[in-house]
């Protein structure tokens, strides 16, 4: 069974996590595990309390198959060395690593954007949060998630394409279902 770890900081963004975790768990039968900084429950922007399975520095996290960093203003407060080391090694091992909104700052701190296409909440915003990060010249101004190999990045306004991109890396054989998921949400914007 595939195991995906979602990293939730205090004030995690509800709309960024709901789609990706529901798609992975309900439709692709991925086991979802939650990590928080201390292993204690964390409350979202909208007031949802999420229980945690692990703390950020728990060694067992290296056994997961995929890593998803959900946006929160806490990510922008600086690098978390345990997360940087974990996702750097996971990516080197060929595992999918994904960040959305301020979760992309952790990817930048870990050096994962060096030589890779990526996006975030804006090129200037990311450069302000992680000054001099490696790979800034590969930034893509995109309203949708950007994929480069096993790396997914997205702005906080792209939760559907983020969910689909992560799902495609974990279960490429489910493309028809994933495309249907994206099309279902796209209806909201295509109908008059």
Image (spheres, rainbow, N blue to C red):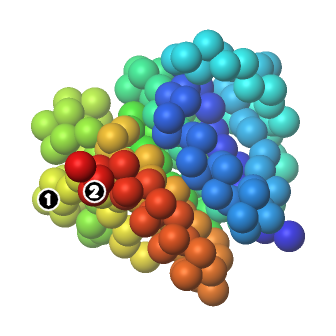
For the point 33% across and 63% down, the residue is: 146
60 to the left or right of 19:
right
Left or right of 144 in this view: 51: right
Disc 2 crowd rating (10 Å Cα; few below 14, some 14-19, many 20+) is few
Q: Position of residue 166 (x, y in %)?
A: 54, 63
N-term-proximal mark, 2 vs 1: 1
Q: Label 1: few (<14), some or many (≥20) within 10 Å?
A: some
Work out whether 101 lies above or below 61: above
Q: Secondary structure at mark 2?
A: helix
Residue found at x 29% / y 53%: 191
Q: Give the quarter of the image for residue 62.
A: bottom right
Q: Is residue 72 above or below residue 1?
A: above
- Residue 102 seen by the camera: yes
SS at mark 1?
Answer: helix
Q: Position of residue 39 (x, y in %)?
A: 79, 26
- Give the side of residue 187 with respect to residue 134, left or right: right
Q: Nearer the viewer, residue 48 or 59?
A: 48
Mark 2 and mark 1: Cα distance apart in space:
34 Å
In screen coordinates, is 51 left or right of 11? right
Farthest-out residue, top: 47
Q: Is residue 41 above or below residue 13?
A: above
Residue at far bottom of view: 173
- Residue 30 pos. (x, y %): 77, 62
Give the residue number, with chain letter if any, for mark 1. 137
Q: Which residue is mark 2?
A: 190
- Which numbered dot is residue 6? none
Residue 134, picture quadrant: bottom left
Q: Are marks 2 and 1 in contact (CB under 8 Å)?
A: no
Q: Please tell me which residue is depicted at 78% across the width and 45% down the height of the picture.
A: 33
Residue displayed at 39% across by 34% down: 102
Q: Nearer the viewer, residue 144 or 152?
A: 144
Quadrant into which the N terminus falls: bottom right
């Amino acid at each position: 069974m595939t195991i995906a770890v979602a990293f939730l900081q205090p004030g995690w963004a509800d709309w960024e996590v709901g789609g990706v975790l529901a798609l992975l768990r309900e439709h692709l039968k991925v086991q979802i595990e939650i990590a928080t900084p201390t292993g204690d429950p964390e409350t979202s922007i909208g007031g949802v309390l999420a229980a945690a399975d692990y703390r950020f520095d728990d060694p067992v996290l290296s056994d997961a198959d995929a890593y998803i960093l959900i946006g929160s203003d806490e990510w922008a407060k600086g690098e978390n060395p345990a997360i940087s080391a974990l996702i750097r090694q996971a990516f080197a091992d060929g595992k999918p690593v994904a960040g959305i909104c301020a979760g992309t700052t952790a990817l930048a701190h870990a050096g994962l954007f060096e030589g890779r296409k990526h996006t975030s909440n804006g090129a200037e915003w990311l450069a302000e949060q992680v000054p001099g990060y490696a790979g800034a010249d590969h930034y893509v101004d995109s309203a949708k998630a950007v994929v480069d190999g096993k790396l997914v990045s997205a702005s906080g306004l792209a939760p559907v394409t983020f969910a689909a991109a992560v799902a495609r890396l974990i279960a490429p054989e489910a493309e028809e279902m994933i495309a249907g998921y994206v099309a279902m949400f796209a209806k909201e914007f295509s109908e008059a």
